[in-house]
Amino acid sequence: MDRAERKRTRRIAADAERWEGLLWRYVRGGAYRNDRLPEARRPVWDYFYYYLYPTAAALPHHQEATKLQVRVSRMGLAALAFVLLALAMWLADARPVGATFGVVALAFLGWMAFDQRRARGLRAELAGILRCVPPSPTDQEIEGVLRRDIDMLTSLALERVDLSRAELLEPPIVISSAAVLQQEDLLGVQTGDLKAVMQVMRAGAGDGRIRFAACYYQFIFITPEQLSTFACLYDHIGGKADSEITREFFLADVVSATTTPEKSTAKLCDGAALAWTTTFQLTVASGDSARMTLLDGAAAAKIVAAFTAVFAPEYHARGIRFPASLTVVESEAERAIHAIRSHLRRKRGASQPLLEPVAGDPAVAAAETPVRSAPVRASESGPPHGGTTSGGAPAAAETPAGASASAGAAATGA
């Protein structure tokens, strides 16, 4: 490689570094620390913050180059006018005046050439910055990343509760929800990057599903004698778990696994409060419990409305297609409740059912079959906050605790 080629290569590398720096300054200054993220986490940042990447019209280079181009056009017209005047004066034997007009025309032409060169440089820099914008990961790619994160968290949860998969009676039960819905006593005090990511969400361009950058996970592990839980707040962008909580209960001491309506102080991205949420709670005879706020139909509908109000104008302004139909996948607590009920019945024997059998009662039949939550669309409304079982029937009354085991009713609340 000769000297000229090496010089050209160094110049190209310097230009690329400058363009990357300008992109970071314009896009990522106040959003989230992308420059310090591991390389594997940057696609997740790109997915959730892609709407912040600039279009050509959004960058200052475009506006400045447009202004310069307008000025170049005006100065070209002025230079042409002075050239014509100079020729007219010259032909009219007013040569000193014609010479003056000629000098002015040359000055305008020089100024015009200078601005034209600046405009070309700005447009070249603009093109370089836009070349640094990475393609947005697809919905399928981000789903793969989220699944790998959950698999990693499952392994972490087993490590925290000191269990192996071989000891479990069934696969780990995972209940997920948006971190922003959780009560403050579960999340603790969030600062820095974790606080910034709490309200971050994005709707998939292909499937219209709203995904959350920060989620709250509850893992439930059932062994022959014990029921262990691990809960944590997880930042999918930074790849970090926070506010970890582990608990262990003897199956014989479990009183109930319920979902109940609860007042909430959580606020969504548009500043609106949820007022009421649905809480999953696992309670033992001592009064101790493991709980989390679920992502139910009512919360999903409000999230869709808040997301549309806040992000639709931003998407349209930046030329990004806003999905025509939005969905939010609800938390799946029914499987956890059904599994806990089944193992408690098996542990205590058929003579001590969790629910009083009532002939023709649909609640008992509903308790035997898990109900898989379906995505909620913006036009759907959530279920009313009343005490119901997972099948939708009125919740059964709790059975008084016996002498040998603290047997209670496992009821759910929508």
Image (cartoon, helix red, strand yellow):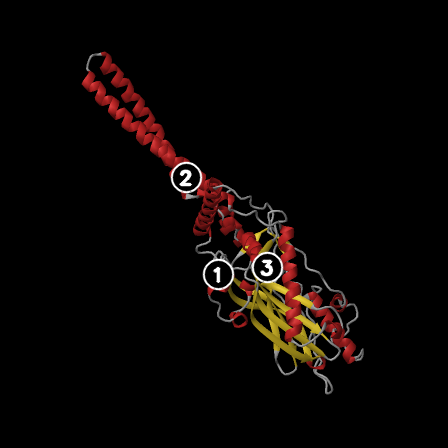
**301 is higher (above) or lower (below) than 72:** below
Labels 2 and 1 touching (C-beta < 8 A)? no
Local crowd size for mark 3, using a 10 Å CA cut-off: few (<14), some (14–19), many (≥20): many
Where is residue 12? Give x, y as percent: 47, 43
Q: CA distance from mark 2 to mark 1?
A: 33 Å
| Quarter residue 162 falls in | bottom right
Residue at 52% from the left image edge and 59% from the top image edge:
37
| Measured Cα–Cα span from mark 1 to mark 3 | 25 Å
Instruction: Name which of mark 1 and mark 3 comes first in the sequence.
Output: 1
The three-letter code of the residue at mark 2 reads Leu
Label number found at residue 196: 1
The residue indicated by pointer 2 is 122
Q: Are marks 3 and 2 in contact (CB under 8 Å)?
A: no
- State which tag comes first along the sequence, 2 or 1: 2
Residue 298 — which label? 3
Quadrant assignment, res 414: bottom right
Query: For the point 48% across and 56% down, which residue is it?
Result: 270
Q: Nearer the viewer, mark 1 or mark 3?
A: 1
| Nearest the eye: 383 or 251 | 251
Q: Amino acid at mark 1?
A: Ala
